[in-house]
Amino acid sequence: MKRFKRAKDVRVGVIGYGGAFAMGKIHLDQMRDFGMTPTAVCDPDPSRLKIAAADFDGIETYTSASRMLATSKVNLVTIITPHNTHAKLALQCLNAGRDVVSEKPFAITVGQCDAMIAAAGRQRRMLSTYHNRHWDGCILEAIDQIHKRKVIGDVVNVNIRTGSYAPPGTWWRSSKSISGGILYDWGVHFLEYALQIINDDMLEVTGFNKNGFWAPRTPWKEDTNEDASFGAVRFKNEKWLTLSMSQIDADAPEGLLRITGTRGTYVMDHFWYEIIQPKPNGATVRTRGRNRDSEEWRFYDNIAKHLTRGTRLIITPEWARRPIQIIETIGKSAKAQRAVKVKYP
């Protein structure tokens, strides 16, 4: 989708500047690093707009997305707001003729994803999701070791398990109606890693949820995220993926992903990896190393090149919909108490 001659012609804005992790500034800085022009910031909190004006000389500031879209000449809008607002804001921006990047998760439901994809198609605008961790050093190293060097043979399954024994926090990420649930934050990242390891057609999902243990002791009460959630994804060609996230797990294991192959196991963590290979005598050889550096800068590099050169978009909306489909189907399966077939392979 080549729409601009030069990267500086891409006038960028963000919806949501302050709050957690100063993400508005991070996004604008990264877009500027690849030649795009920071132009506008929208945030309902005037104090955050003052910070934005100090960070970016001459930047336009707005307290409503409607006013920004009606007044500003921004071409590309990045949405940095709570999860349950992504779809509504993305549709508003797309229908106003803007290209859109949504912070992850792409949305909460597959239906929302579909509506966003349809709007982008009608308006002939770019739509992507900020899956910057697609280029984390841990997954880049894993792909090289597993797919290129074949250190564990053919991949059979990917197991993801993480957790702690602690009540949900006091911010919106612990509210199910706002966040989507326990799996929608880090779970989306972990699934995006895993789908790079098993890039195959999905068939069905089985899910289990535990609710109510922490709820009476949290500020969200009935709206608190699940205490624990587990899902198993069946892929074509006898491969599978499991995801377990818990706040009642007192002994979560080392490593984020455990990938089993026909000739060994690969354990992946953010900073290190371990390859476990069997020997003919029944013993095992363990090789431990550090992951390469992350290359998250490649996200906005790809966005800029896509808009100015027509370079293939790496994080397509269809790709970003895949982890959302898994998470939503885990919930459907847990409620139905049976495996549920997926809509999109």
Image (cartoon, rainbow, N blue to C red):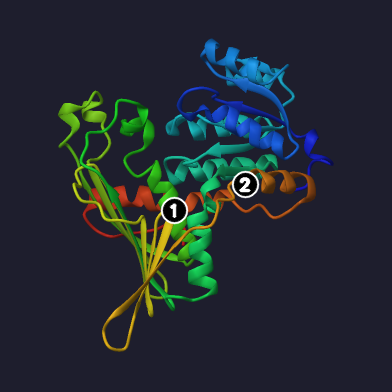
Residue 343 at least partly seen = no
Q: Which residue is mark 1?
A: 271
Q: Which residue is mark 2?
A: 299
Question: Splitting the image into 4 quarters, where does residue 26 fall?
Answer: top right
85 above or below 286?
Answer: above
Name which residue lies at 78% across and 42% down.
3
Question: What is the three-letter code of the residue carrying label 1?
Answer: Phe
Label 2: element kind: helix
Q: Is residue 71 left or right of residue 291?
A: right
Question: Within 10 angstroms of label 1, few (less than 14), some, or many (20 or more) residues?
Answer: some
Name which residue lies at 51% across and 22% down.
18
- CA gap between label 1 and label 2 equals 21 Å
Q: Is residue 260 left or right of residue 5?
A: left
Expressed as whole percent of the image width and height from the top left, the position of residue 326 reads 39, 53
Name which residue lies at 37% across and 34% down.
179
Nearest to the observer: residue 333 or residue 226 = 226
Circle nearer the N terminus (1, 2): 1
Expressed as whole percent of the image width and height from the top left, the position of residue 324 reads 43, 48
161 above or below 58?
Answer: below
Name which residue lies at 52% across and 54% down.
137
Label 1: element kind: loop
Expressed as whole percent of the image width and height from the top left, the position of residue 145 reads 50, 69
